[in-house]
Image (cartoon, coloured by chain):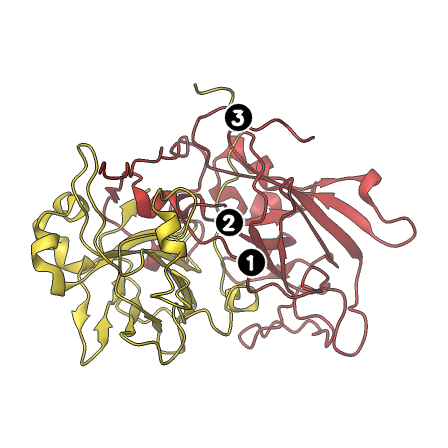
Amino acid sequence: MSATQLDLTPSQTVGPYLSLGLPWPDGPDVVPEGTPGAVVIGGTVYDGQGAPVVDAVIETWQADPAGRFDHPDDPRRAAAREGSEYPGFRAFGRAPTDDEGHWSVRTLLPGPLPGFGDDPAQAPHIDVSVFARGLLDRVVTRIYFPDFAEANATDPVLAAVPGERRHTLLAEPDGAGRYRFDIRLRGDGETVFLQI
Amino acid sequence: MTPPVLHPPGYLPAPDGTHPPLESPGYRSTGLRAPQQQPVVLPDRLTEVTGPLLTGPVRPGDDDLTIGEHGEAQGQRIVVFGRVLDSDGRPLPGTLVEIWQANAAGRYAHRWDNWPAPLDPNFTGGGRVITDKLGNYSFTTIKPGAYPWGNHHNAWRPAHIHFSLFGRAFTQRLVTQMYFPDDPLFGQDPIFNSVPEQARHRLVSTFDLDATRPEWALAFRFDIVLRGRGQTPFEEPHA
């Protein structure tokens, strides 16, 4: 089926001045303030010397709490569209880091994704892109949650990660309705990044 | 009841020689930020083949960067336009394109940019637009200037415009930079040269006389190709 392919456009860094182009006032609000069941997920981005990265932007993409995507490639989209159960849920978050290297988004916890064919079910997760000066391409990771230990134990992506580094993909509870997810770009405790 | 099949086709990986290596020592900032461990392969599943289909953050006029709060921005007016496609040749309609850039003097309207070139009170340097039904986008802006950046002795960034693209899948997300034809600064720029040599020209726009606005603005074309699925488009071509 693979006919002639057009050449892909190469990636370049966002540079230090990404805040002129990328942030939106409501970027970190995957759901509006006051949404029942909303949680705040955030953390600090660190460089290879443990210094905070103050010029990064984090983007998140996730299923709704029923494990569905409002997207034409999700065969259950119709159900997601009816999803008045989750009003204002955008599924996408964008948060620049602040002067302390901290980012956060307000969202709903995603639901698990059902299995299909030979593919096992997936534990609730959020896909994350990290952009920053010094990153010539985005790096991608995933956030998982300690609340779903049973599902995490059979998740195919977690299973592909060496056991001693798996914890870097797990958010830590950080008080009621809050999770901490630090990102270490390089060096000690380096976050597991995923090649997509 | 049969459970729904949740196996939409994945996207073709970027061929070797497309993107810059994260570890590119000539660009000093990579030294503290590029991961050292090999990434773990994440096959495309539902989370990766879906993605935000955003239209929200674009307001009327966001595609014209030359209109400032108190008047017109300084510099050479240009139209920057092109088409967003996937590698199968399928246009990507209705997708968000975001840009940001320095002003005509090569200065960013950013609190950290303290290079002593003049700021322009009528140029903030950010723009947004949604592609039309054929995947076309167009911005009216000012040709950005080059600027020194301290990466190495007398390092100058070639004039460029930052671009951010979504496509329709998490997998397709791309941030890049567009350059201008025949820039004499290419040879000494480690960011441009971080791209494998055979792919660098894809970041260079082309001058398009037919697209200029007579007596008003020059025009540069920059087509952008995101990952495709290796499937021949089945829609009838519109062009």
**Front tag of 1 and 2:** 1
The answer to whether residue A55 is above or below residue B208 is below
Whole-percent x, y for residue A182 in the image: 25, 67
What chain is the yellow one?
A: A
- Say which of A188 and A25 sits in front: A25
Disc 1 versus disc 2: distance between alpha carbons?
Answer: 31 Å
Q: Which residue is mark 2?
A: B191
Three-letter amino acid code of the residue under disc 3: Phe
**Front tag of 2 and 3:** 3
- Say which of B104 and B61 sits in front: B61
Q: Secondary structure at mark 3?
A: loop
Chain hosting mark 2? B
Disc 3 versus disc 1: distance between alpha carbons?
Answer: 25 Å
Disc 2 versus disc 3: distance between alpha carbons?
Answer: 38 Å
Q: Please indicate, yes or no, whether residue A29 appears anywhere in the rendered image.
A: yes
Q: Which residue is mark 1?
A: B55
Tell whether A151 sits left or right of B224: left
Chain hosting mark 3? B
Q: Please indicate, yes or no, whether residue B23 appears anywhere in the rendered image.
A: no
Q: Quadrant of the C terminus of chain A?
A: top left
Q: Are marks 3 and 1 in contact (CB under 8 Å)?
A: no
Q: Secondary structure at mark 2?
A: loop
What is the total number of numbered labels drawn onto the structure image? 3
Q: Which residue is mark 3?
A: B234
Three-letter amino acid code of the residue under disc 2: Ile
Q: Quadrant of the N terminus of chain A?
A: top left
What chain is the red one?
A: B
Tell whether A123 sits left or right of B78: left
- Say which of A136 and B128 sits in front: B128
